[in-house]
Amino acid sequence: MSEETLLRGVNIVKDYPAKRGDEALRVLNGIDIEIQQQSVLCIVGASGSGKSTLLHVLSGLDRPTVGNVYYENKDLNTLKEDELAWFRNHSLGFVFQFHHLLPEFTALENVFIPAMLNGGDKEELQERAHDLLRRFNVDHRCNHRPAELSGGEQQRVALARALMNHPRIIMADEPTGNLDETNTRVLLDLLVGLRDDEQISIVMATHDRDLIQHAEHVYQLSKGKLTPLS
């Protein structure tokens, strides 16, 4: 393992329970992967290939059937559920194809309210949330609810929310899947810029091969196996 490795998966296998009379469905089959500090890693593959499942296992949202995930040499399998929740809340940020913004709250509230679960001063959290929205050029929409925002604006708000707790890794699952070409370019530039500005690692899962030009490491996921492409 490299000294710069932040997160790694070793021999990851993920099965889903069988329906009556069927065999268990094996989605991931013995995957090894390393995520380096301050890097961009891209996982490509067809829809249904298991990209989301792999991100969920690497992030501790789901446990592997077999294998281990290590964050800074700490085995996530040894953590209790509340410890896993703490790890996810403090070390990771998530950006999804469907932004999962809370419809009843404004853009500003969507960014800072999840961070309030960690405690802290509300005014300071609001200030950071506003700074993040300004950075992504949506601060003029901070008092608008998600239904009043465009798709690109919603995704930028989701990215701001992912950064609220100063994560070391951003997990992005099909982050441009619902965006047009212009907004896709904007979001990708923002994501890649974060690597240097925030000194974080970014893991993107996508079926869009155009995204791989932004990554130092690219993997193909097919039939449960992960193959390095670069």
Image (cartoon, rainbow, N blue to C red):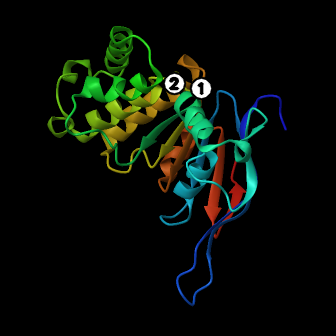
Q: Residue 188: x percent and y percent?
A: 44, 35
Q: Residue 19: x percent and y percent?
A: 52, 82
Q: Residue 6: x percent and y percent?
A: 71, 33
Q: Give the residue at x 35% y 23%.
A: 112
Cβ atoms under marks 2 and 1 closer than 8 Å: yes
- Describe residue 9's horizontal placement relative to residue 25 as left or right: right
Rendered image quadrant of residue 84: top right
- Describe residue 190's horizontal placement relative to residue 137 as left or right: right
Tag 1: residue type? Ile
Q: Give the residue at x 37% y 32%.
A: 186
**Which mark is drawn over residue 200?**
1
Tag 2 residue: 194
Say whether residue 8 is visible: no
Residue 180 versus residue 185 in the image, above or below: below
Rendered image quadrant of residue 4: top right
- Describe residue 59's horizontal placement relative to residue 31 as left or right: left
Say whether residue 49 is visible: yes
Q: Give the residue at x 18% y 32%.
A: 145
Q: Secondary structure at mark 1?
A: loop
Tag 2: residue type? Leu
Residue 22 versus residue 76 in the image, above or below: below
Q: Residue 26: x percent and y percent?
A: 64, 72
First in residue order: circle 2 vs circle 1: 2
Q: Give the residue at x 79% y 35%.
A: 73
Q: Secondary structure at mark 2?
A: helix
